Image (cartoon, helix red, strand yellow):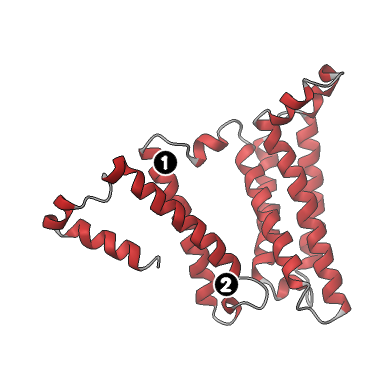
Amino acid sequence: VTFLTPLFILFFDFVSCLRNKFDFATLWDGKLEGYTLLVHVLWWTFGTAFMTKAGGIAYEALNVYFSSWASLFSSIHLLDLWGGEKDVLTIRELTRLSITLPAWWAVFWSSIVTFASAADAIRIVQTPSAKKSCEFAVAVGVISAIVSAFFILQHYEFLTCCCRCCEGFETMKWLSYGGWFELACSLLVNLWFIIGVDQLTSAGQISSTITGEGKSAFGILWDDDGDDEGM
């Protein structure tokens, strides 16, 4: 599907007589292109999740693994470029509120991959040690996802709006981002993932057989180091 769609668009773009009759970039004031890219992102989100799940085809042929992730990231990048051209919401606009917000978003999505990969792997593991490793990976992903989601919501003042309805709002301002509380939580997440990476990527552990989980674990540690540097 995602091979034929770009091929069709490129064909009409290169042939001038067809481009004059069917300019994909201007149809519906450019919205058709945006809808197509959004469908591609959703398509590859489900496709990547299906192909790279524990025991999936991506682990039998690594080119499928890497190409599926590359297709997903390319679709997201193209949608982001379209959003910038049409003055719609972009990733930069979504994450520009502070220097630490992009890192928290990266930690959040990497945590989701860690959690989902480990939760899916539980159904196929056969040894008690492997099951224990999966359960620990689930805990690592869930806890880091909750912490990162908290600071993401704080950046958008979602939790602040809720707290204004509560008594003692002034005393809760220390929970906001950009202060010592965020720094302390970032250091704790770093420590948590140093332990997690050591445990999950050691010989015989679950990350040795689930590539996505291992890379996401390292990815969270790397992104959270960047978070500390930004503060």
Q: Is residue 60 above or below residue 33?
A: below
- Quadrant of the snapshot with the C terminus: top right
Percent coordinates x, y for residue 170 in the rendering: 82, 17
Farthest residue toward the left? 17
Relative placement, left or right, of 46 versus 182 is left
Instruction: Tell me if residue 152 comes above or below residue 53 in the rendering.
Output: above
User: Is 220 positioned to the left or the right of 135 in the image?
Assistant: left
Query: How many numbered marks does the figure carry?
Result: 2
**In the rendering, at what x and y percent does residue 119 appear?**
76, 66
Residue at 61%, 31% in the rendered image: 98
Q: Are marks 2 and 1 in contact (CB under 8 Å)?
A: no
| Quadrant of the rendered image containing residue 173 | top right
Residue, x 39% and y 47% (percent of image)? 34
- Label 2 sits on residue: 51
Dot 2, crowdedness within 10 Å: few (<14), some or many (≥20)?
Answer: some
Q: Secondary structure at mark 2?
A: helix
Q: Residue at x 57, y 76 (%)?
A: 58
Give the amino acid type for the residue marked by disc 2 in the picture.
Answer: Met
- Image point (67%, 40%), residue name: 229
Given residues 162 and 106, the one toward you in this image is 162
In the displayed orientation, state which residue is furthest to the front.
Answer: 28
Q: Please provide percent x and percent y for residue 197.
A: 76, 61
Q: Please tell me the numbered disc located at residue 166.
A: none
Amino acid at circle 1: Gly
Q: Which residue is mark 1?
A: 83
Quarter occupied by residue 159: top right
Can you say whether 173 is above or below 82 in the image? Answer: above
**Secondary structure beneath label 1:** helix
Spot occupied by residue 206 in the image (x, y as percentages of width and height): 76, 72
Task: Name which of mark 2 and mark 1 comes first in the sequence.
Answer: 2
Distance, label 2 to label 1, CA atoms, is: 28 Å
